[in-house]
Image (cartoon, rainbow, N blue to C red):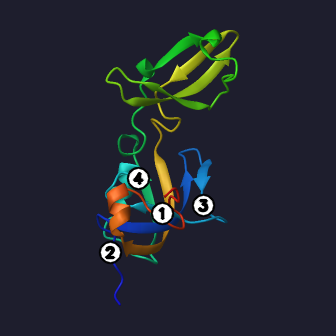
């Protein structure tokens, strides 16, 4: 059987190491379970997904993703200070903590705690990696056609995927 190239509606399993411009390793699957996603369904950053298209199991590659195709450009207007008292007592804010609020259109909006200063908390809609160029060292472990229920649910089932059904 010939290898399947990565295309929409394929389940792709890969190992990666994510490095930032300063050489910091931000995330890695090395030494752990490979990551699995459903190609073409927005399960990974757009620039990485686009550059994986057409590749196949066994490929090893270095992929650079600019901010616009990663977590977006950094937007200073997306930050604001709020009083620490705005947080419920049982949810003491911690730098890096992520929570959801509702956007003006009623959609869930992720918010991160960026800084704490006295009774003020700086929150941001910028993802912690916004404005950063991402470099992925990737090893593609497997590519297969998605099962009908994975396509219906929009995510991978089984090892490396979701198991909530």
- In three-dimensional space, the C-alpha distance between marks 1 and 2, rounded to whole angstroms, equals 15 Å
Of all residues, the one furthest to the bottom in this rendering is: 1
Residue at which label 2 appears: 5
Residue at which label 4 appears: 43
User: Between tags 3 and 4, which lies in front?
Assistant: 4
Q: How many numbered tags mark residues here?
A: 4
Residue at which label 3 appears: 29
Q: Please name the residue shown 56% across and 51% down the image.
A: 19
Of all residues, the one furthest to the front in this rendering is: 165
Q: Label 4 near label 2: C-beta < 8 Å?
A: no
- In three-dimensional space, the C-alpha distance between marks 2 and 3, rounded to whole angstroms, equals 22 Å
Q: Label 1 near label 4: C-beta < 8 Å?
A: no
SS of the residue under disc 4 = loop
Reply above or below: 13 against 85: below
User: Between tags 2 and 4, which lies in front?
Assistant: 4
Describe residue 127's horizontal placement relative to residue 56 as left or right: right
Residue at which label 1 appears: 36
First in sequence, mark 2 or 3: give its number: 2
First in sequence, mark 1 or 2: give its number: 2
Within 10 Å of disc 2 (Cα), the crowding (few <14, some 14-19, many 20+) is: some
Residue 39 in view, yes or no: no
x and y percent of residue 56 in the render?
A: 38, 75
SS of the residue under disc 1 = strand
């Amino acid at each position: 059987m010939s290898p399947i190239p990565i295309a929409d509606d394929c389940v792709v399993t890969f190992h990666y190491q994510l490095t930032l411009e300063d050489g910091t390793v931000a995330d890695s699957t090395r030494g752990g379970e490979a990551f699995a996603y459903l190609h073409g369904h927005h399960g990974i950053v757009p620039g990485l997904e686009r550059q994986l298209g057409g590749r196949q199991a066994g490929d090893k590659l270095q992929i650079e993703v600019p901010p616009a195709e990663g977590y977006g450009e950094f937007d200073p207007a997306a930050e604001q200070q709020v009083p620490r008292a705005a947080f419920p007592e049982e949810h003491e804010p911690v730098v890096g903590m992520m929570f959801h609020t509702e956007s003006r259109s009623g959609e869930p909006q992720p918010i991160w705690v960026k800084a704490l200063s006295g009774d003020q908390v700086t929150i941001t809609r910028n993802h912690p990696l916004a404005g950063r160029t991402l470099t992925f060292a990737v090893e593609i472990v497997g590519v297969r056609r998605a099962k009908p229920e994975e396509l219906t649910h929009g995510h991978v089932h089984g090892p490396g995927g979701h198991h909530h059904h």
